[in-house]
Image (tube, rainbow, N blue to C red):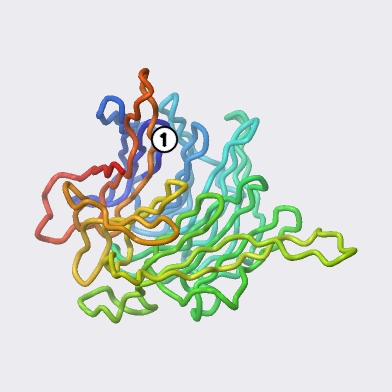
Amino acid sequence: MAALGDGLLVWGGRGEQGLLNDGARFLERTNQWVPMSREGAPSPREEFAWALAGKWLLVAGGKADGILADAFVYDVLTDRWAPLPASPAPGPRHLAAAVGTALSNGVRFYVLGGLGPEGALHDLWALDLVDGASVQWTRLSEGCPLQQPPVRSPFQTRGMSLFLVPGVFSPLAFSGLGIDGTQARAAVFDLGTSQWTLDEVSRAPRPREGASAVYDGRWLIIEGGVHPGAQPGEDLADYVADGAYLQPVRPEVPDGGTGDAGPRWEWTSFRDSARTTVPRAFHAAVTTGDTVLVAGGNDPGYCGGGARWDLSRWDRLSVAQAPGPLPLAGGVWLTPSLDADGGVQGGGFYVFGGHRPSALTGTPPLVLRWIP
């Protein structure tokens, strides 16, 4: 699920009857779903990389009967799909991370890592889509230093996360297993030197799987998860009940220095000392720029409701009409707008889909909004 203007975009994945290759756009102003064209659409799949930039949606790779290599772009304005060149291209993979950004003459997407037929991948690719006509894949790096999380059950798997540092548009990657599984780590790719720079290891948080990771252009914020190898269940000891945020810190320049050194990326840990949140993993999370909102996920059972963190403390969200127990649900934040009278309208924390307990199987798909 992705935020798109005044609505949401949902495509593909797995439903109760199997894999899907349909999608729709949700228009907040009319509270309606508009189906996406299926002509020329990718085949049914799950665990694919996808990202939205400008009017373009990228869908790359994924998993069906096997691991898929094909990639497509979707034009939101014309409701049309187009296949991308097969070579050079990232190749077969699932659980890869992707992110995109609009440029003056088109868009650029990045695809990182994932799992291929022979195991974990660590390469970084860029896709340049210029004026909707010229399309080119470029491999930028073969060696992201972060570890790709392993495959769990279909509803307890979360790969690396990928973001873009504003201004320089450098890819910022996060893995709950870091380099060797001893700490959660992050790394930034320098487009000028084609090198990865790791975060400051001395304060890196403990390792985890299934943590949420959000980035607002200032802080990369991670929360929750389970200890590596643990299976979410009834034992609270399996859960990581803390979080941390990462931010760039400019080094002090000595007298006579040039000040050309780039920033260090340093972690600051936080804990829910008041125990206002439920330990959880594989949950939905978004950032509004001032707060972080989390909902759903696995706790010792299935986790409903949510919480808000404002960089100082956690507060529970209202449980009235709150999202139900939805591990691996998607979450997006839509910024409220002003009406003609200057009042606030629309916006909020949208939660869609996810894996529901067997007791809820067969119930309609959920789209829920929490309004702050």
Q: Which of 322 and 358 is in front in this view?
A: 322
Residue at x 45% of width, y 58% of height: 311
According to the picture, the residue beneath numbered tag 1 turns out to be 4
Of residues 341 and 334, the one nearer the viewer is: 341
Residue 272, quarter of the rendered image: bottom left
Q: x%, y% of residue 153?
A: 29, 68
Amino acid marked by disc 1 = Leu
Crowding at dot 1, Cα within 10 Å, few <14 / some 14-19 / many 20+, comes out as some
Taking the spot 45% from the left edge, 47% from the top edge, the residue there is: 50
Quadrant that contains the N terminus: top left
Q: Where 178 sits versus 137, above or below?
A: below
Asked if residue 63 can be seen in this view, the reply is no
Would residue 77 be seen by someone viewing this image from the given angle? yes
Coordinates of residue 15 in the picture (x, y in percent): 23, 50
- In the rendered image, residue 285, in percent from the top left (x then y), is placed at 37, 54
Q: Please give the name of the residue rendered at 19% of the width and 54% of the height, measured from the top-left corner.
A: 324
Residue 21 is left or right of residue 185, and the answer is left
